[in-house]
Image (tube, rainbow, N blue to C red):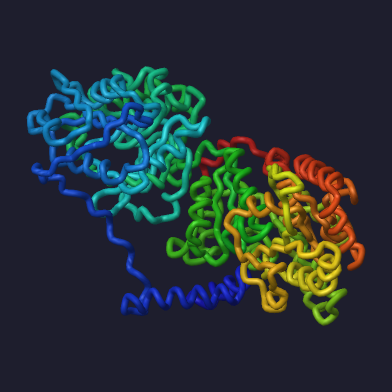
């Protein structure tokens, strides 16, 4: 039932070839399973039994561990062995040590050294509890980082690398894991603390694959079943506070202390830990060690009374409380998940995500086709963007209806998105500033295209009516250049229009002129101006360039160029397809071309080249709205002969090349840096904490 809509979006965003490829891949996968039904959900992780006492575990020795894994243990030898076996299996790439603190066990734990080699076992003379055992283990640690791990846990592939990716950041103080029950249900995706000192394990008993639990985010605390932090910070904070001995609330207290020290507490879904909750202490809070969970809540509330006054009330509910501290909650809907290695619009949107996260905003993203898009979706999740996808929602409008009141701003990117969801967003997102991000003004681009191809003039007029109608509906329209803003001052004088251009920090390559060779053309070939530009260049300009430069190669970067272009392929015109990392290509090339005849907005291919310090030869259309000066920042030529002459001049003149390289990067730094984008977005969104969001 969903196929027609998803197919339509795929064709719009990625082309018909991508749709055919997706269908063939999915049908092939289903047929290989012997059924046309969708794939069943993956089975839950299979924990080890850990009961084979005859198996000897041998950990690698290291004189300089980077990480010290501290495991407090009280009885439960089978759980301990299973935990150790999982560490040994899934922690191969890092230098680490394992410190087991035996809290005066009465089972075979006292003989652990005889069954497990290469670990450090400390035996307590009396039972001191979790707090005392963890502090003793940390005191014996040699690693730069401490990881506290319960013995009733089992780690999974990549767990430690994922923790360290965040723990290594200067602004992060403590990192916690996604905890999953042995039956596959979610146990915790970070913790919430309410103003009365009570806590909540976010996502408890839910599906761990749900989009809400799979993005990096700041949390109030992370369960001590698996947390990581720098040993230096742990020692500076005095370790786990002994007032919570023997156990409970010590992990929450540590998280509050980390924040009080100016560091973040972050949930890392990329570290998934199987946790048999209560294996040691049970779950009954009226008896045994678990009763301290109630006793220590009062101690915690007294110690952190001031901080708790800024926490959400219990009435706020987990979904509101989860991102309580964020200065703004922003929803972005775009036609597809950004592919930064594919097109400049994706680069811009990806950088908008980065800047909003840097500003502390909670950012939710919905692709129009609701697709989980593999590594591209995961990249956003690692950035801290809550990316929403099928089957956890069935339509964008349904999501807006259910959750729209939570958002302070809603950004609808591109006309096709704003056209379909603009009125629903206005209806359901009652507290939000509604923003139309044009990316570029489509009707302007199509009007210019119609000057070359008059048969599409009606399409250009339709785009104009639709875009101007959206601008009347929304609170704010974003454009990428002063040229577009000036146009709308005439066409839509009542609309509020602001500029948020392309975003990117220059990172010039340092290859000298003499060691560079060839030219680059980089493009998204589903975008008509890019196909037209290269076809015209190869037909009318490149032969002139080749006559004067001999066999200087042209490298064409971009996925699935059409046959009208690939027919020009030769030893000296090379189609490289999609390139995952374009920096080496720019580091090797002498110049970049952008021979655009029509279009709108700021051209990403021009910006990318200048960011890498590679001079650009382009047209007036290609340089539009960027404030570039011919012969100073860029070379601009509009007829075939002048364009060919400019290419030859830059290719053969080291002094001109050096001037354009330096000045071009500087022009990009002044206009399009992430600092500048942060300043603009902060002003547009009026980023001030809003206590009233508790009511939403």
Q: Quadrant of residue 435?
A: bottom right
Q: Is residue 625 above or below residue 249?
A: below
In this view of the protein, which residue sits in the foreground, 175 or 294? 175
Q: Residue 177 location, x and y as percent?
A: 37, 41
Q: Kindly indicate the quadrant of the structure image that contains residue 69.
A: top left
- In percent of width and height, residue 658 lies at 81, 44
x and y percent of residue 339 in the render? 59, 58
Q: Residue furthest bottom?
A: 455
Instruction: Judge whether 101 appears above or below 472 on screen.
Output: above
Q: Nearer the viewer, residue 225 or 341?
A: 341
- Between 167 and 651, the residue placed more toward the observer is 651
**Residue drawn at (33%, 48%), measured in percent from left and top?**
157
Instruction: Residue at 27% x, 36% y: name it.
Output: 60
> From this viewpoint, is residue 494 visible?
no
Residue at position x 67%, y 67% in the image = 574
**Residue 575 in picture, x, y percent from top left:** 66, 68
Q: How many numbered badges does the structure rendering display?
A: 0
Residue 92, quarter of picture? top left
Q: Relative to 465, say whether 79 is above or below.
A: above
Q: Is residue 213 left or right of residue 561?
A: left
Given the current orientation, which residue lies at the most extreme front position?
A: 550
Drawn side of residue 558 relative to residue 273, left or right = right
Q: Is residue 61 left or right of residue 193?
A: left
């Amino acid at each position: 039932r969903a196929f027609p809509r998803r197919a339509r979006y795929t064709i719009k965003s990625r082309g018909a070839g991508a749709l055919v490829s997706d269908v063939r891949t999915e049908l092939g996968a289903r047929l290989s399973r012997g059924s046309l039904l969708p794939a069943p959900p993956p089975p839950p992780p299979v924990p080890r039994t850990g009961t084979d006492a005859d198996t000897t575990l041998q950990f690698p020795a290291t004189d300089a561990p980077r990480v010290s894994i501290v495991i407090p243990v009280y009885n439960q030898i089978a759980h301990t062995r299973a935990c150790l076996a999982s560490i040994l299996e899934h922690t191969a790439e890092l230098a680490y040590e394992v410190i087991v603190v035996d809290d005066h066990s009465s089972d075979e734990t006292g003989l652990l050294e005889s069954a497990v080699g290469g670990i450090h076992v400390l035996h307590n003379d009396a039972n001191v509890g979790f707090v005392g055992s963890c502090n003793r283990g940390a005191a014996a640690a040699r690693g730069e980082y401490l990881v506290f791990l319960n013995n009733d846990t089992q780690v999974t592939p990549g767990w430690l690398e994922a923790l360290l990716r965040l723990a290594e950041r200067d602004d992060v103080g403590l990192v916690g894991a996604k905890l999953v029950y042995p039956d596959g249900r979610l146990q915790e995706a970070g913790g919430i603390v309410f103003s009365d000192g009570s806590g909540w394990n976010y996502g408890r008993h839910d599906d761990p694959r749900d989009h809400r639990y799979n993005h990096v985010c700041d949390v109030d605390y992370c369960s001590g079943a698996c947390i990581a932090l720098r040993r230096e910070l742990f020692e500076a904070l005095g370790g786990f506070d002994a007032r919570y001995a023997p156990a409970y609330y010590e992990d929450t207290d540590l998280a509050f202390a980390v924040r009080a020290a100016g560091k973040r507490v972050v949930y890392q879904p990329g570290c998934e830990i199987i946790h048999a909750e209560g294996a040691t202490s049970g779950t009954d809070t009226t008896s045994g060690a678990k009763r301290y969970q109630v006793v220590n809540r009062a101690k915690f509330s007294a110690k952190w009374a001031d901080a708790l006054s800024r926490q959400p009330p219990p009435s706020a509910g987990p979904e509101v409380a989860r991102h309580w501290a964020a200065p703004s909650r922003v929803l972005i809907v775009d036609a597809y998940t950004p592919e930064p290695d594919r097109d400049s619009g994706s680069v811009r949107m990806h950088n908008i995500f980065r800047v909003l996260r840097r500003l502390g905003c909670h950012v939710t993203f919905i692709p129009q086709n609701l697709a989980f898009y593999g590594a591209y979706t995961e990249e956003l999740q690692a950035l801290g963007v809550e990316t929403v996808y099928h089957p956890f929602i069935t339509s964008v409008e349904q999501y807006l209806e259910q959750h729209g009141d939570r958002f302070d701003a809603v950004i609808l990117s591109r006309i096709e998105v704003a056209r379909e969801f603009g009125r629903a967003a206005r209806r359901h997102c009652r507290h939000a500033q509604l923003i139309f991000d044009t990316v570029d003004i489509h009707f302007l681009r199509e009007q210019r295209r119609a000057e070359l191809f008059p048969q599409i003039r009606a399409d250009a007029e339709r785009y104009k009516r639709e875009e101007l109608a959206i601008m009347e509906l929304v609170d704010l329209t974003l454009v990428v250049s002063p040229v577009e803003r000036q146009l709308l001052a005439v066409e839509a004088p009542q609309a509020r229009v602001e500029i948020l251009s392309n975003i990117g920090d220059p990172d010039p390559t340092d290859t000298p002129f003499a060691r560079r060779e060839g030219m680059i053309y980089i493009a998204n070939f589903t975008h008509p101006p890019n196909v037209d530009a290269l076809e015209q260049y190869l037909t009318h300009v490149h032969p002139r360039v080749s006559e004067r430069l001999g066999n200087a190669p042209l490298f064409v970067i971009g996925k699935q160029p059409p046959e009208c272009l690939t027919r020009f392929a030769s030893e000296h015109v090379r189609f490289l397809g999609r390139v995952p990392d374009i920096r080496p290509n720019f580091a090797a090339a002498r110049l970049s071309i952008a021979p655009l005849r029509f279009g709108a907005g700021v051209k990403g291919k021009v910006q990318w080249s200048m960011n890498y310090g590679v001079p650009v030869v382009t047209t007036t259309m290609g340089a539009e709205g960027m404030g570039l000066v011919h012969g100073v920042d860029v070379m601009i030529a509009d007829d075939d002969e002048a364009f060919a002459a400019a290419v030859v001049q830059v290719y053969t003149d080291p002094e001109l090349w050096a001037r354009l390289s330096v000045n071009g990067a500087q022009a990009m730094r002044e206009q399009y840096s992430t600092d500048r984008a942060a300043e603009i977005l902060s002003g547009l969104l009026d980023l001030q904490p809003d206590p009233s969001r508790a009511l939403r």
